[in-house]
Image (spheres, rainbow, N blue to C red):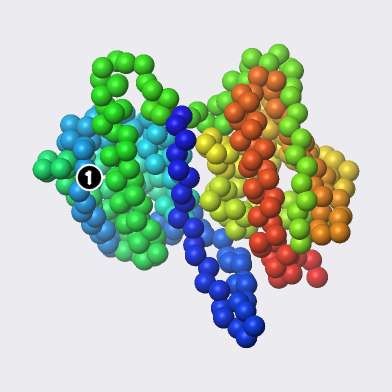
Amino acid sequence: MKKVLFVLPIILLVSVLIVGGCAKPAPNLVPPPTGTDLLNKAFKESGGQTVDLVVDQEIRDVTVDMFNWWMVKGNIQPYYRVWWPEMHYEANFVKHGDKMGVIIKEMIWPYYTEFDCNIITQGIAFLNPDGVQIGQLVHTPKASAKGITLNSVFTFPAKTPQSFIDAMRVHCKGEMQDFTRFLPELYKQVNAKAELTPDMVPPPTGTDLLNKAFEESGGQTVDLVVDQEVAGVTADMFMWWMHAAIQPYYRVWWPEMHYEVIMLPSGPIIKEMIWPYYTEFRCNLLQLPPTQVGIGFLTPDDQKIGQLVHTPTASAKGITLNSVFTFPAKTPQSFIDAMRVHCKGEMQDFARFLPELYKQKGPK
C-alpha cells in the first residue's frame, strides 16, 4: 500500500505563560467515551426527539455513478480501509432478520465508534443493541461542474452531545473529501477488472494476519524483543497500569492508536491500530511471577497463537522495559515491524500521563 501521510487530528495543548518560561500543561486524564455509548445514552434520554446535522459540500472529480457504486452497490466493505485509513477501520455486512445491515468501526475523533446499522435508501439507519433505530444518515449526491455536490443529513437523538455532533461534521467533511484521492482510480481499475495497484489494496486486519499465520505455521513461533527505557515511570506505576488501570483509562494512553478494552471473564479484548493494521486482540491473562505481566493471544475458538510478556526493571531515569512478543512463525514481517514501532510509541507515551494519573488514582 502506498505510504499515506499519517496526519491525525490531535488536540492542541496550549502552554500557560509564567515568569521565566512556559509551564507544561497538565495531561488530560479523562478518557473520551465511545461514540456508541454517547448515542445509546442520548437515545434513552431524548424521549423520541431528534436533532439533525446537515453537511453540504462539493467533491471534485467524483461522479454520482462513482459515489453510488461505492455507497449503494456494496463496494464499501471490501475497500473500506483504502478510504481515509487513519479514521476508518472495518466495515462488515451483516443480516438483521430480513434486512441487510453493516457494522462500521471508525474514529469520529476523539470518539471511537461502532455503528450497527440497517441499510436504507441512500443511507443507513443507526441501531441500538436491541435493534431499535436511534438515528440515520442519508446522502444525496448531485452532479456539478467539478464533480458532485453532496448533501448529508444525520439524524441523532436530541440529547446527543454537541461535541459529538461537531466531531461528526468534521469527520463527514474529511472522509468525503478523501474520495478525490482514490475513488476515481479505484472505480476505473475495478470496473476494468484490472489487477489493483498497491495503493488501491486495503491492508488486512492484524487479527486476520495472525489467525492465518497460525494456521500455516505448524506450531512454530517467532519472537519480537523490544527493549527500551521509559523515563519518569516506576515499576509500581507500570504494574498498577497493567493490572488495574488499563481498561478505564485506555483511551488516555496514545489515543490516536488505542481505541477500546473490553474485559470478559476469560480476559480482555483489545482494539488498537498497529499501523496500518487495525487489530482486535482476543486475550487471556498469563500467570507470571509478580515482576512480570503479560497476555496470551487467542483464536476465535480459544487456541493460543502467541503471547506478550513485559518485564519492567528500575533504572536511573525510570524503568527499562523488556517486551517479548511471541507470534506464529509465518506472521508477515510487515506486521512484526509495525508491532515494534507500535510498542515503542505506546510505551514512550507513558511519560506524558502515567505519573500524574498514578498520583491521582493509584494506591494510597
The quarter of the picture where the C terminus appears is bottom right
Residue 79 x, y percent position in the rendering: 38, 30
Query: In this figure, which residue is indicated by the disc labeled 1?
Result: 59
Q: Secondary structure at mark 1?
A: strand
Residue 323 x, y percent position in the rendering: 77, 40
Mark 1, other Cα within 10 Å: few <14 / some 14–19 / many ≥20:
many
Image position of 290 with respect to 336: above or below: below
Query: The disc labelled 1 sits on which kind of residue?
Result: Ile
Can you tell which quarter of the image residue 193 is in? top left
Residue 115 x, y percent position in the rendering: 40, 45
* Closer to the camera in the image, 196 or 50: 196
Can you tell which quarter of the image residue 279 is in? top right
Whether residue 108 sits left or right of residue 176 in the image: it is right
Q: Is residue 280 visible?
A: no
Number of numbered discs overlaid on the protein picture: 1
Can you tell which quarter of the image residue 60 is in? top left
User: Residue, x 60% and y 47% (percent of image)?
Assistant: 261
Residue 301 x, y percent position in the rendering: 63, 25
* Closer to the camera in the image, 27 or 189: 189
User: Residue, x 46% and y 29% (percent of image)?
Assistant: 1
User: Residue, x 59% and y 28% (percent of image)?
Assistant: 334
Q: Residue furthest bottom?
A: 19
User: Residue, x 79% and y 47% (percent of image)?
Assistant: 321
Image position of 114 with respect to 99: above or below: below
* Closer to the camera in the image, 73 or 266: 73
